[in-house]
Image: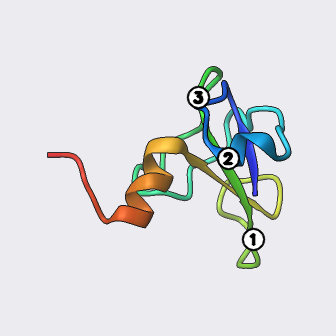
Amino acid sequence: MQWFGESWGAHVCEGEHVPTPVGAICFGSCAQPIAEGDQGVVLPFLGFEGIGNPSPDAPYHLACFLRSITGAHDG
């Protein structure tokens, strides 16, 4: 798993740090573009093309990724 943004102290942040995929659409619950200064992870994605991301990777905002694991949601 790759990660981007500023480290949040998790073990994943000891792995491969990649540039923030600015403009790529988050694969998480928000489906919003990744912005400069965001933190998150990038997972390999083997799916369909044409979803707004220029690569076969699936970027997630950190909060969206954590919600996908825990099932928590805002509100």
Image coordinates of residue 71 in percent, x first then y, are 31, 65
Image coordinates of residue 43 in percent, x first then y, are 72, 61
Mark 1 or mark 3: name the one nearer the start of the chain: 3
Q: Residue at x 41, y 49 (%)?
A: 30
Nearer the camera: disc 3 or disc 2: 2
> Would you name the residue on which mark 3 appears?
38
The circle drawn on residue 49 is 1
> Would you name the residue on which mark 2 appears?
11
- The CA distance from mark 3 to mark 2 is 18 Å
By what rule are the colours in the image chosen? rainbow
Task: Kindly identify the amino acid type of the residue bearing the numbered disc 3.
Answer: Asp
The circle drawn on residue 75 is none
| Secondary element at tag 3 | loop
Task: Kindly identify the amino acid type of the residue bearing the numbered disc 2.
Answer: His
The residue sitting at the left extreme is: 75
Mark 1 or mark 2: name the one nearer the start of the chain: 2
On screen, residue 9 versus residue 49, left or right, reads left
